[in-house]
Amino acid sequence: MNNFFIVFGSSSSLILRFLTSLLLARYFGAELFGVYVFLLTLSEVISRLFDFSLFHAGIFESRISNTKVSFSFYVILFNSIIFFPLILLLLTGISFLSFENNLNNILYENILFISFYISIKQISNSGIALRGIDNSLKLFSLMQFCNSLFPLAIISTLIYLESISINNIFQFLLFSEILFLLLFISKFLGNFSFDSQKIINLYKFGLKAHLGVFGKILIHNIDKIIISIFLPAQIVGFYSIAKSFTELSIFLFNMFLIKFRNKLLKFSQDLKFLRRVTYKELVKNLILIFPIGIIFYFFSEQFITLLYGKEYIFSSNILRVIIWSNIFIFLPSIIWNYFYVLNKPNLVSLSILIPGIIGSVSFYIFIKYLGVQGLYLGYYFSIILTFITTFLWFVLSRKKV
């Protein structure tokens, strides 16, 4: 039953966010949708940079030292308030950079709302994550569902009324996050007693986990921002749509990993068994990934035009190329589960952070000098580098088994 709530919360959230993006793409058109993708990606990147993975720390501390969820939530709340001026200052600095399609001016006009949105989003995301650890999986899945449903409901209503634009969309996204917090924040309220040692422990563990998070940001999010610097906003929109299909297919495979994770946890003391199960899971999923790639390769044009319209036909060309990256994205996630069970999150961080830094620099160079063709090369370079690094650590760790 617990697995059901986890699957329901995650899948419903992904589908609702996909529908929100679909509605905005059809309403805005390719250029304005690309602008929206840039602003949203920038806010997501900054949000993750300044949350310091405190919700990961809260989960860990609640299990080893009985730190209350409400205590971790208050620390995250104070962290968001303290770093709000720095987020505002950072966005102001970014708005003075040179982007295609006058994106810096659009960012400057929306700085205040985007800054508030980033801070509130940090709190709501952390609240959802923390709720999943205190035997409240029903509420956890409901919070995931509502956090994605509210913006979809508000945006679809505004589209129907033709009252939404690129200049006011973050006002409504901010309203959605505030509404969500007002409904669910009471679940975390309680007495807060200051404990400096607990706060230090949260930041210590959070910063360690943050290295891996930073690597994921570099691999999976920074690409859209780099594209925005050198290529037209339409390309950002086309690329985002193509990438959303790969993320959707990766998510479906991740749902099948729940049974694999449970098996790893059950036999966590038998290292040889863990390794053997991991090998079998790698081979099985490698076989399953190919049919997905073939379907999207031959029918990408039909999928794109049916859902988004002919204006986005170029997304199908991008999708045909990047859909095969699923192999290099998904298989490492199987090995990361193996590392987590062995209590070696540092190997996960190293597998992600180093390729993330090298890949981001390479992506920047490829895009700058090769344009759209550089997009494909840069994308695959960072993904394959992560794949190779992860397998290298997996092979080297065999000596300790």
Image: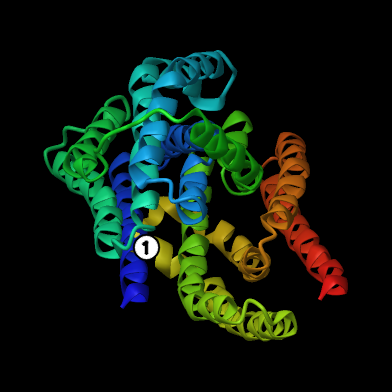
User: In the image, 131: left or right of 48?
Assistant: left
User: In the image, 85: left or right of 223?
Assistant: left
Look at the picture and state if 224 lies above or below 129. above
Q: What residue type is labelled 1?
A: Ser
Look at the picture and state if 256 lies above or below 15. below
Judge by depth and name the residue closer to the eye, 95 or 335.
335
Q: How is the image coloured?
A: rainbow
Counting from the top left corner in percent of width and height, residue 41 is at: 48, 38
**Circle 1 residues within 10 Å: few <14, some 14–19, many ≥20:** some
Counting from the top left corner in percent of width and height, residue 369 is at: 77, 36
Residue 281 image-quadrant placement: bottom right
Q: Is mark 1 on a helix, strand or loop?
A: helix
State the quadrant of the N terminus: bottom left
* Residue name at image x 22 percent, y 46 percent: 187
* Residue name at image x 66 percent, y 78 percent: 269
Residue 16 image-quadrant placement: bottom left
Judge by depth and name the residue closer to the eye, 286 or 120.
120
Residue 337 image-quadrant placement: bottom right
- The residue that label 1 is drawn on is 10
User: In the image, 334: left or right of 88?
Assistant: right
Counting from the top left corner in percent of width and height, residue 18 is at: 35, 56
Q: How many tags in the picture?
A: 1
Q: Determine the residue located farthest toward the left in the rendered image.
A: 161
Look at the picture and state if 358 lies above or below 129. above
* Residue name at image x 39 percent, y 43 percent: 126
The reply to whether residue 165 is in sight is: no
